[in-house]
Image (cartoon, rainbow, N blue to C red):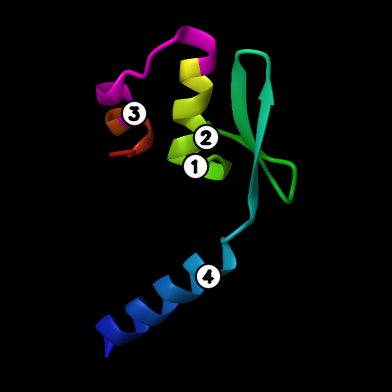
């Protein structure tokens, strides 16, 4: 019973904390902003393709190791 209650509570809390994030770019800076105006890392609102294209545009290459470790992009 405790496990079921914990599972249901976890699902409820996760569903309540889901916010929509948008991707923003200003020059060489890239970040995400939530609906409640919280600022977060690029991967919250930007796709892996967005981040790769930004890296190529600004630095001419993509560090795939960093993409995997920093943003979970494969």
Tell me where the magenta segment starts and ends, as one range: 57-67
Q: Is residue 59 left or right of residue 27?
A: left
Secondary structure category for the residue under label 2: helix
Residue at which label 4 appears = 15
Cα distance in 3D space between marks 1 and 4: 21 Å
Residue closest to the far top: 59
In terms of sequence position, does the residue under pointer 2 or pointer 3 come before the other?
Answer: 2
Please name whichever residue, 42 or 74, is drawn nearer the observer in this view of the structure.
74
Residue closest to the far bottom: 1
Q: Position of residue 53 (x, y in %)?
A: 50, 26
Which residue sits at x=58%, y=68%? 16
Cα distance in 3D space between marks 3 and 1: 11 Å
Q: Position of residue 3 (x, y in %)?
A: 26, 81
Give the crowd class for mark 4: few <14, some 14-19, many >=20 residues within 10 Å: few
Give the crowd class for mark 1: few <14, some 14-19, many >=20 residues within 10 Å: some
Residue at which label 2 appears = 50
Q: Are marks 1 and 2 in contact (CB under 8 Å)?
A: yes
Residue at which label 3 appears = 67
Cα distance in 3D space between marks 4 and 2: 26 Å
């Amino acid at each position: 019973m405790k496990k079921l209650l914990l599972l249901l509570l976890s699902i409820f809390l996760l569903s309540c904390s889901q916010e929509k994030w948008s991707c923003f770019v200003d020059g060489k800076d890239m970040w995400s902003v939530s609906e409640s105006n919280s600022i977060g890392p690029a991967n919250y609102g930007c796709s892996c393709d967005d981040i790769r294209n930004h890296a190529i545009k600004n630095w001419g290459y993509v560090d795939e190791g960093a993409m995997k470790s920093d943003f979970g992009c494969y």
